[in-house]
Image (cartoon, helix red, strand yellow):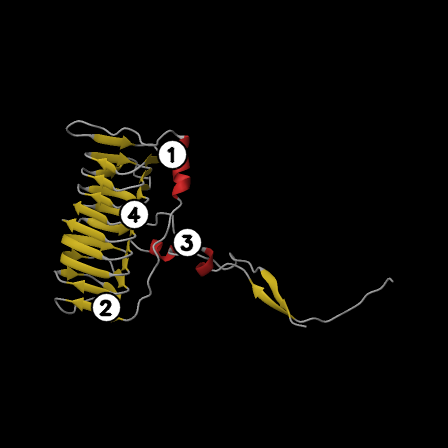
Amino acid sequence: VVGTIEESVTVLLKDYGETTEDRYSPGWQAWNHTIFANLTCDLNGNAGEVDGSIFANGLVKATGGLNYSEPVEVMSATKIETTGNSSSTGTLTAPDVTVENGPVAGLVETEEAVENITFPEMDFLALYNEAVATGLVDPPLAGGASPVDDFSGVSVVWFNGDARFKGDLVFDGKIVATGDIRVAGNATISDPSAMGEILSRDGGISVTGNADVQGLLYAPGNIKIAGTPKMEGQIVSGANVKLAGNIDVITYKDTGHGPASFEPGENPDLVGIVAWLE
């Protein structure tokens, strides 16, 4: 039989095109902030400056003289508490906001619910494979009275277990350890155009000297910076963040891990049939 048959049907359609919410893995919102703490953020120092935004799922506490030269956005899913001499313009948003010295000109305090943000995970297997390919797994560290570990021009250095740098750390790639990372001296980027990263897979990070870093500090554990830190980039912790000492400045810079902005037409429709209704 040769011919044409026409039939009308009713189907249920769905647009499977990706949106900002479903395109990225859980926790992508954390990459929008200068400092992200999955638990608490403790800003404890003098004459400090944080430019950008701070987010913590737990308590954000500012103790000492903390200043913000640019409008700053501080958010907590639990509480924000300032107990020192803080001056800033911007917003404090949390279910509970307490400013010890009363209202501050130019600062907007908003008490409302704030949704938790999931700690974002990173692909450490790819980093390990890169370090293996270049022979930079567990390299020897410098010794002596004033050791300097210089990894300039190296993309990835991998340490199994803890990595303890007793002196200065100079790098412009990625320093990765499966355990805790401790830098007792100064941490600096050798190439001003580079984006360095200090990454712990299972532990925490502590920099007790003077950090002058452009890039990322990332750890599922606690991240602590003491001394006179100056940093341009991001701090992302799966636990607590603490800045102590005479804080210089922590300024936001996109480290390239978060979602790109969406422009009209970037996400074409992807339509599929969900069910045949008739």
Identified by mark 1, the residue type is: Ala
How far is disc 1 from disc 2 in space, using C-alphas? 47 Å
Looking at the image, is mark 4 or mark 3 nearer the viewer? 4
Tell me whether the residue at label 4 lies in contact with that at label 2, contact meaning CB atoms closer than 8 angstroms: no
**Lower sequence index among marks 4 and 2:** 2
Tell me whether the residue at label 1 lies in contact with that at label 2, contact meaning CB atoms closer than 8 angstroms: no
Residue corresponding to mark 2: 108
Residue corresponding to mark 4: 219
**Lower sequence index among marks 1 and 2:** 2
Residue at horizontal 23 percent and vertical 65 percent from the top: 79
How far is disc 1 from disc 3 in space, using C-alphas? 26 Å
Residue corresponding to mark 3: 259
Tell me whether the residue at label 1 lies in contact with that at label 3, contact meaning CB atoms closer than 8 angstroms: no
**Lower sequence index among marks 2 and 3:** 2
Looking at the image, is mark 1 or mark 2 nearer the viewer? 1
Q: Tell me the element at label 3.
A: loop
In x, y percent, where is residue 75? 27, 62
Residue corresponding to mark 1: 131
Tell me whether the residue at label 2 lies in contact with that at label 3, contact meaning CB atoms closer than 8 angstroms: no
Q: Tell me the element at label 2.
A: strand
How far is disc 2 from disc 3 in space, using C-alphas? 28 Å
Would you say 138 lies left or right of 99 here? right
How far is disc 1 from disc 4 in space, using C-alphas? 19 Å
The residue nearer to you, when weighing 10 against 50, is: 10
Residue furthest to the top in view is: 144
Q: Tell me the element at label 1.
A: helix
In x, y percent, where is residue 106? 21, 66
